[in-house]
């Protein structure tokens, strides 16, 4: 794959994000330019408050930039309505949040089925898909446990299963290993690598841990709302 | 999309069984309380107004005695005669002499009140007969021991048998039963009006009390004539005949049944509005309960809505789901509340012996209110959350 000729999957052009107004104004992004191609696995790093989560939220169409343009495939996301962005999330994006954000008192299976319900998938098909996704993340046999009955690592894996069950084009993960010990973190990272390798899912992941970042092919460093460095990892150079 | 929202809402209800149950309970309590209170209130009002009607209209009652006065003079036939001469527009004057006694029939006995009366008593008290006849003139003149029994006596002693040719014993006296009064039920004061035995006044005086007088009489005033005016005339006449000087108090009571009726109507109206107020409070408490549950769960719900939005739900889909949930819970609560209220009302009405009157309007109003509360407090917090940016909703503390 030659990266020069192909159109990037994601393109940020001079994206800014300003929170608040007047005295309380806070500029989180100062004009970010970023291109990500289909099939990439990118780690996003940087000090706290440097704008990593803000960028991820804009990338994931959960939030809108204050200025600049964001192209997703051929779509100008910054021109879309709220509902159009929701549909974009529904059909192309998968999220793994740091806080898991599973529905409480809801079984793992039902949690994983949720995005499929919004896609209007029939019950039977939904069940099979969700079961398979849980199997992929190593939770076969835990389908009927609720989040309260699962460990942190297991909850994170349910959240990952929910993100990949729709076979999204892009998987966004904001500190997916933030709450896990190093053994569990490694498992999760291996899983993400395999999704990237075997399913061709483009992955963007925020992390503070250099060890984890090394699983990706490319590392983007944020400092003060700008991309400070952008380089390939050992894996990326292979 | 609606079907989808319906399924999601049902799932949500099942998932939050306790919350759903409490919401439904709030609605059930609100609706049931209002319907029961109003139904019973209406029943009591109807019962009382029926009792008032059974008293007879335009009726005055005179009784000898007074506040703190002992040994007040009883009334005599001379008084009755004088009233007949002096006061116009009367339909009947009915002297009554009463005594408590035990009636014996076969091997059963029953304690009751025996009233010595004339046939004017039937006119004044609005009494009709279901069996037999009133007293004959000769019975009245001679003071024969003939008696007319009330419905309660008939039920207790005769157990529904015909009275024809039967005899009762009143203490030592035997008397021939000649008539049966139609039942009137309880008086407005709660006394059983049918627990009575009537005998000719003369028989009472000669054979039982041994006096020539009586301490009560009823005065029926012509329809359309003012009882107030008659009452004043009667009071003046009685004071005169009893030689009371201007500074002496009455040694007799004069009661206008219309006054009793007015007092009672006032009381039941007050009772009904009191019940209404209590019901209103229950409705409010139910509403506050629902509000509480919904507000307590708002943080969790906001996060949940954030999750759904992030996953790709449209704002309208989330709203529809919550609306359906609120409607399902409210209608379920409403339905249970109405059924419960109707069953309870029938039972309570039965045990209180008041008629069961169904008021469709109140069912309608109560349902509307509770459904409104359920929907407003279930739906509006959800709407606020669904309008948030998904990130803000997820971050909600
Ligand atoms: N909703 C918000 N309102 C106001 N300011 C915000 C909001 N979200 C983020 N910020 C500010 O924007 C800046 C960038 O925040 P962001 O969450 O992107 O940082 P981050 O790189 O993810 O940090 P961390 O590593 O701590 O998660 C921070 O200074 C933060 O205070
Ligand atoms: Mg962050």
Image: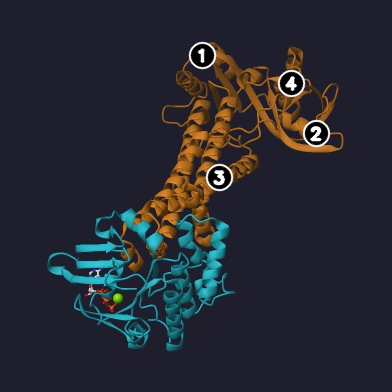
Chain colours: A cyan, B orange
Decide which of B323, B94 is in the foreground and name it.
Answer: B323
Which residue was labeled with disc 4?
Answer: B130
Residues indicated by labels 3 and 1 sit on the same polypeptide chain: yes
* For residue B124, above or below residue B374: above
Decide which of B397, A7 is in the foreground and name it.
Answer: A7
**Alpha-carbon span between mark 2 and mark 3:** 47 Å
Q: Residue furthest left?
A: A23
Earlier sequence position, callout 4 versus callout 2: 4
Which residue was labeled with disc 1?
Answer: B87
Mark 4–mark 2 contact, CB under 8 Å?
no
Classed neighbour count for the residue bearing mark 3: other residues with Cα under 10 Å, few (<14), some (14–19), many (≥20) = some
**Alpha-carbon span between mark 4 and mark 2:** 17 Å
Q: Nearer the viewer, mark 1 or mark 4?
A: 4
Residue B368 x %, y %? 45, 42
Chain where mark 4 sits: B
Q: Nearer the viewer, mark 1 or mark 2?
A: 2
Under tag 3, what secondary structure? helix
Classed neighbour count for the residue bearing mark 1: other residues with Cα under 10 Å, few (<14), some (14–19), many (≥20) = few
Which residue was labeled with disc 2?
Answer: B157
Q: Nearer the viewer, mark 2 or mark 3?
A: 3
Residue B100 x %, y %? 71, 35
Decide which of A184, B251 is in the foreground and name it.
Answer: A184
Residues indicated by labels 2 and 3 sit on the same polypeptide chain: yes
Earlier sequence position, callout 3 versus callout 1: 1
Which residue was labeled with disc 3?
Answer: B335
Q: Nearer the viewer, mark 3 or mark 1?
A: 3
**Quarter of the image that includes the C terminus of chain A:** bottom left
Earlier sequence position, callout 1 versus callout 4: 1
């Amino acid at each position: 794959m030659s990266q020069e000729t192909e159109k990037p999957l994601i393109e940020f052009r001079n994206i800014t994000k300003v929170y608040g107004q007047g005295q309380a104004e806070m500029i989180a992004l100062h004009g970010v330019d970023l291109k990500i191609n289909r099939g990439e696995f990118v780690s996003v790093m940087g000090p706290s408050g440097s704008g990593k989560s803000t960028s991820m939220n804009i990338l994931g169409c959960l939030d809108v930039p204050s200025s600049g343009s964001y192209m997703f495939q051929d779509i100008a996301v910054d021109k879309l309505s709220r509902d159009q962005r929701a549909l974009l999330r529904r059909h192309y994006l998968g999220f793994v949040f740091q806080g898991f954000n599973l529905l409480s008192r809801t079984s793992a299976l039902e949690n994983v089925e949720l995005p499929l319900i919004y896609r209007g998938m029939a019950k039977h098909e939904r069940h099979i898909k969700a079961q398979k996704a849980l199997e992929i993340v190593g939770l076969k046999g835990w389908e009927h446990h609720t989040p309260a009955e699962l460990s942190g690592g297991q909850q994170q894996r349910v959240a990952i299963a929910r993100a990949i069950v729709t076979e999204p084009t892009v998987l966004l993960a904001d500190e997916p290993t933030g709450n896990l010990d190093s053994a569990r973190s490694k498992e999760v990272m291996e899983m993400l690598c395999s999704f990237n390798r075997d399913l061709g899912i483009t992955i963007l992941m925020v992390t503070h841990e250099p060890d984890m970042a090394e699983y990706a092919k490319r590392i983007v460093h944020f400092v003060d709302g700008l991309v400070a460095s952008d380089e390939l990892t050992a894996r990326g150079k292979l | 999309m609606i079907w989808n929202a319906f399924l999601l809402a049902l799932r949500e209800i099942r998932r939050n069984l306790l919350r759903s149950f409490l919401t439904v309970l709030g609605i059930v309590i609100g609706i049931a309380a209002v319907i029961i209170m109003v139904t019973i209130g209406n029943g009591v009002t109807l019962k009382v107004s029926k009792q008032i009607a059974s008293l007879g209209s335009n009726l005055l009652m005179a009784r000898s005695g007074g506040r703190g006065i002992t040994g007040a003079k009883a009334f005599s036939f001379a008084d009755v005669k004088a009233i007949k001469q002096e006061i116009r527009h009367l339909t009947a004057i009915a002297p009554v002499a009463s005594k408590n006694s035990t009636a014996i029939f076969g091997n059963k006995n029953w304690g009751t009140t025996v009233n010595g009366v004339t046939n004017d008593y039937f006119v004044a008290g609005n009494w009709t007969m279901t069996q037999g006849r009133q007293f004959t003139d000769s019975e009245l003149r001679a003071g024969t021991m003939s008696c007319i029994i009330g419905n309660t006596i008939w039920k207790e002693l005769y157990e529904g048998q015909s009275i024809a040719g039967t005899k009762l014993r009143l203490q030592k006296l035997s008397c021939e039963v000649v008539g049966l009064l139609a039942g009137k039920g309880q008086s407005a004061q709660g006394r059983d009006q049918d627990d009575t035995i009537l005998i000719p006044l003369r028989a009472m005086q000669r054979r039982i009390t041994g006096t020539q007088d009586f301490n009560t009489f009823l005065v029926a005033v012509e329809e359309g004539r003012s009882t107030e005016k008659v009452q004043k005339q009667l009071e003046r006449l009685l004071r005169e005949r009893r030689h009371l000087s201007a500074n002496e108090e009455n040694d007799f009571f004069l009661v206008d049944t219309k006054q009793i009726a007015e007092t009672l109507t006032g009381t039941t109206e007050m009772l009904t509005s009191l019940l209404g107020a209590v019901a209103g409070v229950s409705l409010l408490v139910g509403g506050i309960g629902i509000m509480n549950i919904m507000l307590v769960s708002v943080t969790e719900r906001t996060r949940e809505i954030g999750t759904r939005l992030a996953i790709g739900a449209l704002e309208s889909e989330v709203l529809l789901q919550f609306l359906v949930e609120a409607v399902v819970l409210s209608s379920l609560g409403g339905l249970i509340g109405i059924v419960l209220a109707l069953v309870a009302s029938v039972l309570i009405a039965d045990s209180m012996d008041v008629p069961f009157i169904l008021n469709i309007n109140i069912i309608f109003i109560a349902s509307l209110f509770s459904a409104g509360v359920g929907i407003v407090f279930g739906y509006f917090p959800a709407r606020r959350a669904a309008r948030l940016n998904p990130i803000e909703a997820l971050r909600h503390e």
